[in-house]
Image (cartoon, rainbow, N blue to C red):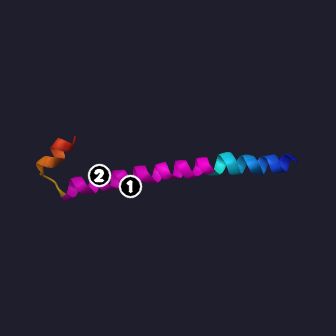
Amino acid sequence: MAGAVLIAVILVVVIPMSVCMSGAVIAAILGRSLNDTGEHTHEGSELIDLNR
């Protein structure tokens, strides 16, 4: 019986939380990378200053 409860807890709590956290990490890395690329590509543009 304890094994079934443990499996249920893993399926309901651990797996969704790990998916959400890994999604947040990927979004942070992608956002930072795209921001750096945009600033490097459009260096000297007045729109970069307005975005801050």
* Mark count: 2
Q: Quadrant of residue 41?
A: bottom left
Residue drawn where x is 21% and y is 43% of the image? 51
Q: Secondary structure at mark 1?
A: helix
Measuring 42% from the left and 52% from the top, which residue is drawn there?
Answer: 27
Asked if residue 21 is among those painted magenta in the image, a careful observer would answer yes
Judging by the rendered image, the residue that carries numbered circle 2 is 35
- Whole-Å distance between the Cαs marked 1 and 2? 8 Å
The C terminus: image quadrant: top left
What segment carries the magenta color? 16-41
Question: The residue tagged with tag 2: helix, strand or loop?
Answer: helix
Q: Front-most of 2 and 12?
A: 12
Q: Nearer the viewer, residue 7 or 37?
A: 7
**Label of residue 51 in the image:** none
Q: Nearer the viewer, residue 17 or 37?
A: 17
Q: Position of residue 31 (x, y in %)?
A: 36, 51
Looking at the rendered structure, the kind of residue marked 1 is Leu
Residue 39 part of the magenta segment: yes
Q: Position of residue 36 (x, y in %)?
A: 28, 53
Q: Position of residue 19 (x, y in %)?
A: 56, 52
